[in-house]
Amino acid sequence: MPLTDLTLAQCLALQPDLDEPADLDAFWHQTLRAARAAGGAPRLTPVDTGLTQVTTYDVTVPGFAGEPVRGWLHLPAGADGPLGCVVEFLGYGRGRGLPHEQVLWANAGYAHFVMDTRGQGWSTAGGDTPDTASLNGDVPGFLTRGVDDPHDHYYRRVFTDAVRFVEAARAHPAVDPNRTVVTGVSQGGGISLAVAGLVPGLAGVMPDVPFLCDIRRGATIAGAPPYTEIAEYLRLHRDRAEAVFATLAYVDAALLAARATAPSLFSIAMMDEICPPSTCFAAYHRYGGPKDLRVYEFNGHEGGGGHHRREQLAWVRDLLSPPRPLNESGPSTLHAPQPA
């Protein structure tokens, strides 16, 4: 497939200038404070998956407004002591799926929390975690749901769910809270960047071909959904463009990523028409912490696939391994940002 966006050289030199709401920090502080005040405790129920090397739990965590958010917890069978942890957020339209489907990180020796995404997925109408808000005026999909007001927007609820899910993961006795990494592909990558900007003290962040970054540009150049939902909405509501993008700025992961401090490993695909590379680079360039990068020049939204999982496994191993004595092999370091 051909390039549909800027070249790699242009993306590497990009200096994104995004409109940031003056009250962005206050908005999220108040949102998260209200969610925590709603109370509630996580619930975990053992699940028999038929797997012998991974122990799985059905997880329910109080999310936005204390509403239940489902997920899975996978642990290496017989694991002893607090473990490094990977919290994973899912791609657009995906729910948590079946309990045996995603066990890579547990097989690598980590605690692995997988968060369901409210209103998405297939196992029931609206998934295992329904979206409780009933809002009119949107086009099919989630990007314009509640777009008239940032307090009503769908991703305000999702990002809050994600923060509360990470907090629950870090509080679990099987998890070392200081060795917790967040990750996700596409929508999950955008959520992981938002969480990185909203939750201090994470060990690492792995956004993979991230969605929800430089949303206005995505709406103008993406050739395939979900960004096209915004263009479709504005095709019908010609007079609402500025109000729509003012709302979406509150959930733009590129803006929230500037507040992050944890080390990060990004992946970006240069022939991606779903999450155009310039939008992903906007988040990469604005990211507030140390950052590493893998670029897949001839891939679309599938990105690096299994090749990138291999890169992530090595990166997390180096990041979360206990430091070795200097006289043994020297200190571990992160690589400088570079395309693969």
Image: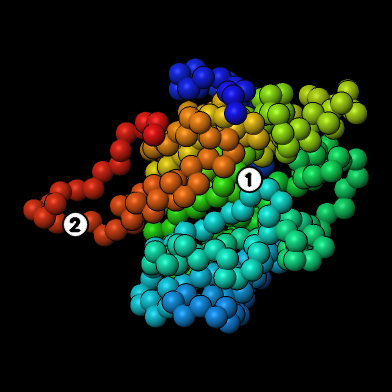
Amino acid type, label 1: Gln
Within 10 angstroms of label 1, few (less than 14), some, or many (20 or more) residues?
A: many
Q: Position of residue 95 (x, y in %)?
A: 68, 59
The residue at 14%/56% (across/down) is 325
Label 2 sits on residue: 324
With 266 as the anchor, is 30 left or right in this view?
A: right
Labelled disc at residue 23: none
With 305 as the anchor, is 62 left or right in this view?
A: right
Q: Position of residue 147 (x, y in %)?
A: 80, 38
Label 1 sits on residue: 187
Say which quadrant the N terminus sits in: top right
With respect to residue 297, does 169 lie above or below? below
Amino acid type, label 2: Arg
Q: Residue furthest left?
A: 327
The residue at 44%/58% (across/down) is 180
All told, the count of numbered labels is 2
The residue at 39%/47% (across/down) is 311
Q: Position of residue 261 (x, y in %)?
A: 43, 42
Query: Which image quarter: residue 295?
Result: top left
With respect to residue 17, does 155 lie above or below? below
> The residue tagged with tag 2: helix, strand or loop?
loop
> The residue tagged with tag 1: helix, strand or loop?
helix
User: In the depicted view, which residue is nearer to us: 113 or 102?
Assistant: 102
Q: Position of residue 128 (x, y in %)?
A: 73, 66
Q: Earlier in the sequence, mark 1 or mark 2?
A: 1
